Amino acid sequence: MEQLQVVRAGIDDFTELRRLEQECFFSPWPGDVLWEDLCSKRSRYFLLRQGKEALGYAGIWMILDEAHINKICISPRCRRKGYGGQLLLGVLLQAWQLGADSLTLEVRKSNAAAIALYSKFGFEIEGVRKGYYEDTGEDALIMWKRGIRAEMERQAE
């Protein structure tokens, strides 16, 4: 079995990102929105690959010393195998290398598996966005992981 890698995605990876977007999300972003975000200077996208196969992806927005995870997903056929944790760890490392000291994200209040994963990686619930998801009106939990630089320095010692 080939090793998992989290690699930077570029415009040449758009077709794979779009496929995963369609597979993973109940209300996927339209292709033009995904393309525009992929091309934005503030955005960074990452693919989780096993060999040449893309198993998932994540997108972040860099804002000063914060990274906002705007998308993270694993193909439905690959879930519950630890791939989400591998992708999230890769995103944390990439965000730190880009200068982030904090990461934030929104997650559906009903997505217990994702909330558990984020909590395992040190994210904490710090707020709620009422009716955030337009497709269902569901609330989003706002989760933060702070102090990434200090954590990385401790691990390097």
Image: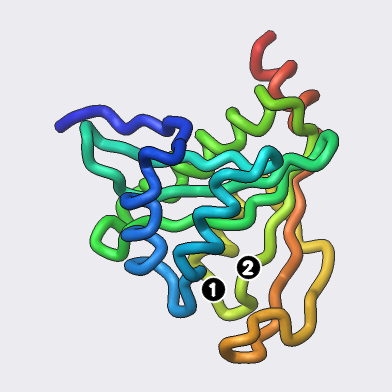
Mark 1 residue element: loop
Residue 82 x/y as whole percent: 37, 48
Q: Is residue 101 left or right of residue 55?
A: right
Q: Residue placed farthest to the bottom in the image?
A: 136
- Image: 78 above or below 137: above
**Residue pointed to by mark 1:** 111
Q: Which mark is residue 34?
A: none
Amino acid type shown at disc 1: Asn
* Residue 94 or residue 34, whichever sits in front: 34
Tell me residue 3's x, y (percent). Answer: 26, 28
Q: Quadrant of the C terminus?
A: top right
Residue at 83% of width from left, 62% of height from top?
Answer: 126
Q: Quadrant of residue 41?
A: top right
The answer to whether residue 111 is above or below residue 98 is: below
Q: Secondary structure at mark 2?
A: strand
Front residue of 36/50: it is 36
Q: Give the residue displayed 46% in from the left and 36% down from the top.
A: 10
Q: Residue at x 59, y 29 (%)?
A: 93
Q: Which quadrant holds the N terminus?
A: top left
- Judge the density around disc 1: few (<14), some (14-19), many (≥20) Cα neighbours within 10 Å: few
Which residue shows up at 44% across the image and 40% down it?
11
Q: CA distance from mark 1 to mark 2?
A: 7 Å
In terms of image quadrants, where is residue 23?
A: bottom left
| Tag 2: amino acid | Val
Where residue 65 appears, x then y in whole percent?
Answer: 83, 34
Asked if the residue at tag 2 contacts the one at tag 1, i.e. Cβ–Cβ closer than 8 Å, the answer is yes
| In front of the other: 118 or 70 | 70
Q: Residue furthest left?
A: 1
In the rendering, at what x and y percent does residue 59 appear?
Answer: 56, 48
Residue 93 to residue 86: above or below:
above
Residue identified by numbered label 2: 107
